[in-house]
Amino acid sequence: MPQELTLPAQETRIAANGVEWIAVQGWGRMKWLWHGFSTRRGGGSRAYCAEGTLGELNLGLTSADDRSVVTENRRLLAGAITGSAETPLVTLRQVHSNLVVRLSKADVDLRAPRRGDGLMTDEPGLLLAVQTADCIPVLVADTKRHVVAAFHAGWRGTVKRIVETGVGRMRLEYGCRPEDLVAAIGPGIGACCYGVGDEVMSAFESQFAYARELFCEVYDSDPVRIRYPMLFLTQRAPGHSPIGPQLHVDLTEANRRQLVDAGVKAEAIRVVGGCTSCHRDLFFSHRGSQGFTGRMMSVIGIRPHSK
Ligand SMILES: [Zn+2]
């Protein structure tokens, strides 16, 4: 299993309001499309950063952060992506399901997010958002019909085929053809850092013929330890090393496989961002921060007057 730690080449952009976000290479050519993956950089949150450092772009209404700060951060993200902080940013109450919500402007009620893990629309002027801090965000766009969708895939949602189901719903509701779709898999925890229990492998094996290909055994899950083993040797009691093996799962690959199985062309799928846990200076990582962390957003929408 490759050790991540180096970031993939990607288009990082810093907006005038200070928000640093990641664009998908080549997607800028689609002038009708808004899209982006946020990082933790920019914004005014103090909840998860060290004293004396700049504020951060926490976009989740977490208990440790101030609601008004998060609301302002969301406006900053909308401003960075669409040029207007007033663009409605639609979120979900994410429940690790395969529920996909078809969204119209008429049912945008920002006070009561709907339950589910996928959002899709063909109406311009809305920014669909999924929140993550290790889970895998997936954005999909129909280049012909101008339909967009955003999905949230943790291991449970991946087992429930949220992305495969989501593409199916795009076909059913909007007549999308898989060969017209482009997709981007955003920053999430990598196979390098995502150690899981046997129950996760059992769940995948019950659903996917290729499940075994998504897992590997790792004898020491910490990439820093693998790079600098001498630093850690003395911390282990005699007879208790090496640790492991532990199962690691590749959720990025799992979701890429679902896109391909749904008919999206392999060459139309981009993987951007990299491992959230390896790059905690750039991303929030739930696992990497022992659960005390903010949330990023992956957003997609149709620019008004583009249809
Ligand atoms: Zn990693």
Image: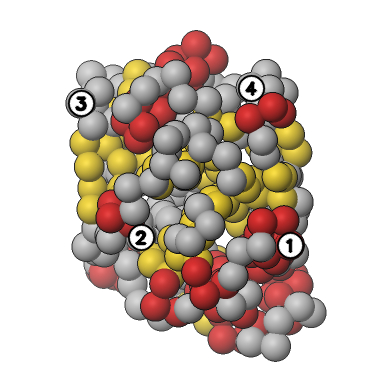
The reply, left or right, for residue 287 in relation to residue 174 is: left
- Give residue 272's mark: 2
Q: Earlier in the sequence, mark 2 or mark 3?
A: 3
**Which label's residue is closer to the chain start, 3 or 1?**
3
Question: Cα distance, mark 3 to mark 1?
Answer: 39 Å
| Residue 81 visible, this orientation | yes
Mark-to-mark CA distance, 2 and 4: 28 Å
Mark closer to the chain start, 3 or 4: 3
Q: Where's residue 288, x and y in %?
A: 45, 49
Spatial separation of the CA atoms under disc 3 and disc 4 = 26 Å
Q: Amino acid at mark 2?
A: Val
In terms of sequence position, does the residue under pointer 4 or pointer 1 come before the other?
A: 4
Q: N-terminal of the two: label 2 or label 1?
A: 1
How far apart are the two marked residues, 2 and 3, measured between alpha carbons? 22 Å
- Marks 3,4: beta carbons within 8 A: no
In this rendering, position of residue 164 left or right of residue 296: right
Please identify, in this view, whether the residue under mark 2 or under mark 4 is nearer the observer: 4
Specify the label residue 172 is tagged with: 1
- Determine the residue positioned at 72% across, 45% down: 101
Residue pointed to by mark 4: 110
**Residue behind mark 3:** 16
Q: Quadrant of residue 116?
A: top right
Q: Nearer the viewer, residue 211 or 113?
A: 113
Using a 10 Å C-alpha cutoff, classify the residue at mark 4 as few (fewer than 14 neighbours), some (14 to 19) or many (20 or more).
few
Q: CA distance from mark 4 to mark 1?
A: 26 Å
Residue at disc 3, secondary structure? loop
